[in-house]
Image (cartoon, rainbow, N blue to C red):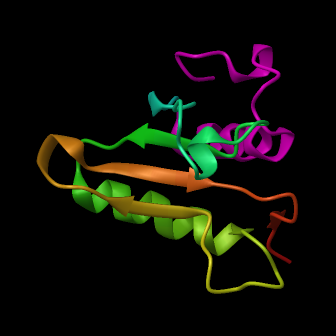
Amino acid sequence: MHYADTEQMEFIHPIMRLLLEDIDLRFGEQTITSLFRIDDDGVHGTLPLRGVDLRSREVAEGLKMAGWINLYWKYDPTRPKYKVAKAHGNGSNFHIHCQVSDLTEVAK
């Protein structure tokens, strides 16, 4: 599990909890760097929480993780242009942004 025990945080969307468990099973324990943001109009400010940022110290590893997530998870089958994971940022700000919707599902 993460340094933050997401199973004990009921404000985290249930699909996000499943995604984080899947990431842990595949890549090992991850560090959450951002959860809820006050006055955020996006997924980091929506309850139940639908956005999480994960630390990535290496660009290649972050891109690999984001690619794996997007291969196995679909944000919204009716809106395929949206992705569950995006590796982005510069330098020490590089991270993997993960987001889910009520329609997010494991790819078939």
The quadrant holding residue 35 is top right
Is residue 18 in the magenta section?
yes
Left or right: 21 in relation to 2: right
Q: Position of residue 88 (x, y in %)?
A: 32, 60
Nearer to us in this view, 103 or 73: 103
For this rendering, which residue is in front, 22 or 41?
Answer: 41
Q: Position of residue 48 (x, y in %)?
A: 79, 36
Depth check: 32 or 41 in front? 41
Position of the C terminus by quadrant: bottom right
> At x 46% / y 58%, what residue is drawn?
65
Q: Is residue 70 magenta?
A: no
| Nearer to us in this view, 61 or 4 | 4
Residue that sits furthest to the left in the current view: 91
The residue positioned 52% from the left and 29% from the top of the image is: 29
Residue depicted at 85% across the width and 39% down the height: 14
Q: Is residue 3 left or right of residue 92?
A: right
Q: Is residue 72 above or below residue 100?
A: below
Looking at the rendered image, the quarter that the N terminus falls into is top right
Residue 42 location in percent, x, y? 58, 53
Provide residue 58's location: percent of width, then percent of height: 23, 49
Q: Quadrant of residue 90?
A: bottom left
State the extent of the magenta-drawn residues as a range: 1-28
Above or below for 64 versus 90? below
Give the main secondary structure, helix, strand or loop, of the magenta stretch. helix
